[in-house]
Image: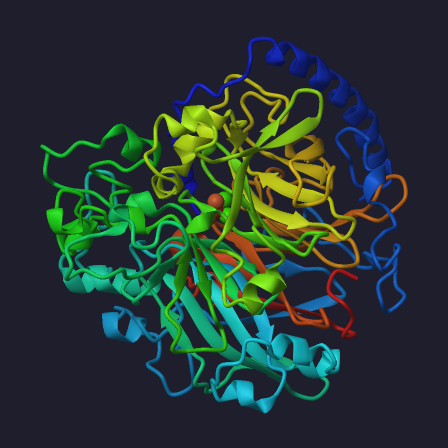
């Protein structure tokens, strides 16, 4: 989302070690040398990709594709959107591709629901598509029973035998709605603005409208049509909205702890600022609460944040949304909701096939500003969840389940409820360590009376463990060769470099990657930097502020951006070939519209449909964009999902 995550709240002093800066400047000089040579090649051999340090050899050739798509094309066999084409008022897509737009903010979540209208009605918004489209995933149906909304946790297994194409015609899309406090979400007419130009809600209806626009949209989608295939929203018992006022449950070590208790009349409700996502091998969706602190505040001047609240950026004003004026849950000084702030900042599990399930907050993963939650099955059958805390100078985490996930589920236990939580230290010599966060660490033990208290304040535990402060960790993905890629979107306030974040300042971001040395459930890794965004500027590869990231099983890396692009570009999605020998290709597949970010990736099982999102087109202002309506039409722009297909029906990215 916008740069609210730009206000650093880490005063831990986990800033680099005295001589790291010198070492890194030298390293940087070395990298610059490599880059200059490589970029020279890029100018002449358009679209050859640029690796920061030439250490690209680990990843090659292990994907199924070995440089070819399944349909025998080179891995990236499309004509990229050029820099010149990628900065217009309308989206642009590679010549071999076409796109459709579905699920605009405010459409009903199933046919015959309330149609979009301005001003938005709060009750309608609770059964309409939310706003701030972000992470998402597609869950295919494997048989007709699913459509009836019956519970069935193992349908995914049954489906493995089904034909991929059949699985790719119908399913449930879970879509995060990150952010909906913009002027255009509320009633534009007569709206009062605060001193900084933010819209002030007039009443509880305004607040409810905004709250109902947040959360998760669950819809059933079906593909139909002849030569021209289209995806449409279906009538479905599974369609639902999960928003700020939906009943939720807590599970794992913090469940039942006093730090989650409010007045007895105030049970846990809601999810907010749902940024990126994850999906589990047992068929559930993970939605990740990021900038939850911004929704809290108080007009009570006697209230001041304590040091633990400050570490999460909880303060009297929040991000200026003023919900607390009409909804006491968000008033920090209201004693009936003393612990409401602790109920947010979690990874939340949703069963897409069970419309009656209450979303479950998985507390074993720790409370932070979760970007996403990338689940990977380790070699020993345990599940690993990689997870970035998106704030300047915050950290990268890894959760490892206590036992193999199948065993835990067979015993009726969630693999996300019992395990070990680690935080990353990126060492100067390109090694890395996963530092365990537990009371066995004497420094952590000295500050927390129990493990649950530590999980609620996991940022502080990570400070004490000696984690490496990063340049805003965003999406994480595991490539088919096992290497883990992470977007570090930017950090214009960095004044002191560390090895893994060697640019000070770092306004354009970089992508780092690592290989686990003892398997994904181990505690050591080696890392290197995949690319510095600034090194692409002035070339056809130009991008800045990498954010969304997804590696497909053939070794394509989809990179999405959120921030001021250079060279006149709108925010965009590029695809890199991780399998190519030598300098792999990267190509620009899609560019959005002015003012938007591109975020969220979901694919059908056959990977012949990809869903991505255009978030905050025109920043809500029709003077910038009316997407998905034509610019200049004067219509209020609406966040929406873009459906990408190859004109010849091929695998996306090929
Ligand atoms: Fe919600 Fe860090 O992007
Ligand atoms: Ca971002
Ligand atoms: Ca993001």
Q: For the C terminus, give its image quadrant.
A: bottom right
Tell me where residue 242 appears, x and y as whole percent.
36, 68
Question: In the rendered image, is residue 48 in sight?
Answer: no
- Rendered residue at 46%/58% (across/down): 287
Q: Is residue 186 left or right of residue 116?
A: left
Q: Looking at the picture, tell me which residue is in the foreground, 153 or 579.
A: 153
Q: Nearer the viewer, residue 226 or 430?
A: 430
| Left or right relative to 653: residue 440 | left
Q: Is residue 414 above or below residue 468?
A: below
Which residue corresponds to the image point at 81% horizontal and 56% vertical from the top-left? 76
Can you say whether 69 is above or below 158 in the image? above
Which residue is depicted at the point 32% across and 81% down? 114
- The relative height of residue 530 versus residue 381 in the rendered view (above or below) is above
Is residue 71 shown to the viewer in this render? yes
Which percent across, then down, holds residue 525? 70, 34
Res 239 quadrant in image: bottom left
Give the x, y percent position of residue 476.
60, 47
């Amino acid at each position: 989302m916008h740069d609210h995550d730009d206000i650093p709240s880490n005063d831990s002093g986990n800033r680099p070690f005295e001589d790291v800066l010198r070492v890194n400047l030298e390293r940087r000089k070395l990298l610059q040398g490599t880059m200059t040579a490589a970029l020279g090649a890029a100018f002449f051999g358009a679209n050859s990709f640029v690796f920061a340090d030439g250490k690209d050899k680990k990843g090659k050739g292990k994907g199924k594709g070995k440089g070819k798509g399944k349909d025998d094309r080179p891995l990236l066999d499309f004509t990229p959107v050029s820099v010149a084409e990628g900065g217009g008022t309308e989206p642009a897509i590679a010549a071999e591709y076409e796109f459709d737009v579905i699920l605009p903010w405010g459409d009903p979540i199933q046919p015959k629901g309330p149609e979009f209208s301005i001003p938005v009605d709060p009750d309608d918004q609770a059964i309409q598509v939310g706003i701030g489209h972000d992470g998402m995933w597609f869950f295919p149906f494997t048989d007709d029973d699913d459509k009836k909304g019956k519970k069935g946790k193992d349908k995914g297994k049954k489906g493995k035998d089904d034909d991929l194409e059949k699985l790719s015609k119908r399913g449930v899309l879970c879509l995060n709605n990150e952010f909906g406090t913009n002027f255009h979400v509320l009633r534009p007419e007569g709206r009062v603005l605060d001193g900084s130009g933010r819209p002030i809600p007039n009443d509880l209806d305004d607040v409810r409208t905004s709250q109902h626009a947040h959360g998760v949209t669950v819809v059933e989608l079906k593909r139909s049509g002849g030569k021209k295939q289209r995806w449409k929203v279906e009538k479905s018992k599974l369609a639902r909205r999960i928003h700020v006022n939906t009943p939720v449950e807590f599970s794992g070590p913090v469940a039942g702890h006093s730090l989650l208790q409010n007045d007895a009349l105030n049970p846990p409700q809601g999810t907010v600022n749902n940024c990126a996502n994850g999906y589990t091998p047992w068929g559930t969706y993970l939605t990740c609460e990021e900038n939850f602190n911004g929704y809290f505040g108080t007009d009570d001047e006697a209230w001041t944040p304590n040091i633990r609240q400050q570490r999460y950026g909880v303060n009297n004003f929040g991000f200026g949304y003023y919900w607390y004026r009409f909804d006491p849950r968000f008033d920090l000084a209201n004693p009936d909701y003393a612990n409401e702030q602790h109920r947010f900042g979690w990874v939340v599990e949703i069963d897409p096939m069970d419309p009656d399930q209450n979303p479950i907050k998985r507390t074993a993963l720790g409370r932070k500003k979760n970007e996403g939650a990338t689940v990977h099955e380790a070699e020993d059958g345990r599940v690993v969840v990689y997870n970035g805390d998106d704030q300047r100078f915050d950290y990268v985490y890894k959760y490892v389940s206590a036992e193999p996930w199948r065993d835990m589920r067979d015993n009726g236990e969630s693999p996300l409820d019992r395990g070990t939580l680690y935080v990353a230290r990126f060492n100067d010599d390109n090694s890395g360590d996963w530092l365990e966060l537990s009371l066995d660490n004497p420094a952590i033990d000295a500050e927390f009376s129990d493990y649950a208290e530590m999980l609620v304040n996991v940022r502080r535990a990570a400070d004490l463990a000696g984690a490496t402060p990063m340049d805003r960790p965003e999406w994480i993905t595991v490539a088919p060769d096992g290497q883990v890629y992470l977007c570090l979107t930017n950090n214009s306030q960095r004044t002191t470099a560390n090895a893994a974040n060697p640019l000070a300042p770092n306004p354009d971001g970089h992508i780092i990657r690592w290989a686990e040395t003892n398997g994904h459930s181990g505690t050591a890794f080696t890392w290197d930097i995949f690319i510095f965004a600034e090194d692409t500027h002035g070339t056809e590869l130009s991008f800045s502020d990498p954010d969304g990231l997804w590696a497909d099983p053939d070794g394509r890396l989809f990179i999405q951006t959120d921030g001021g692009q250079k060279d006149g570009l709108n925010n965009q999605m590029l695809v890199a070939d991780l399998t190519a020998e030598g300098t792999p290709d990267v190509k620009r597949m899609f560019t959005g519209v002015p003012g938007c970010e591109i975020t969220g990736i979901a694919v059908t099982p056959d990977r012949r449909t990809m869903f991505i999102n255009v978030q905050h087109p025109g920043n809500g202002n029709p003077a910038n964009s009316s997407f998905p309506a034509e610019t200049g039409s004067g219509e209020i722009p609406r966040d929406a999902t873009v459906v990408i297909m190859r004109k010849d029906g091929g695998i996306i990215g090929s």
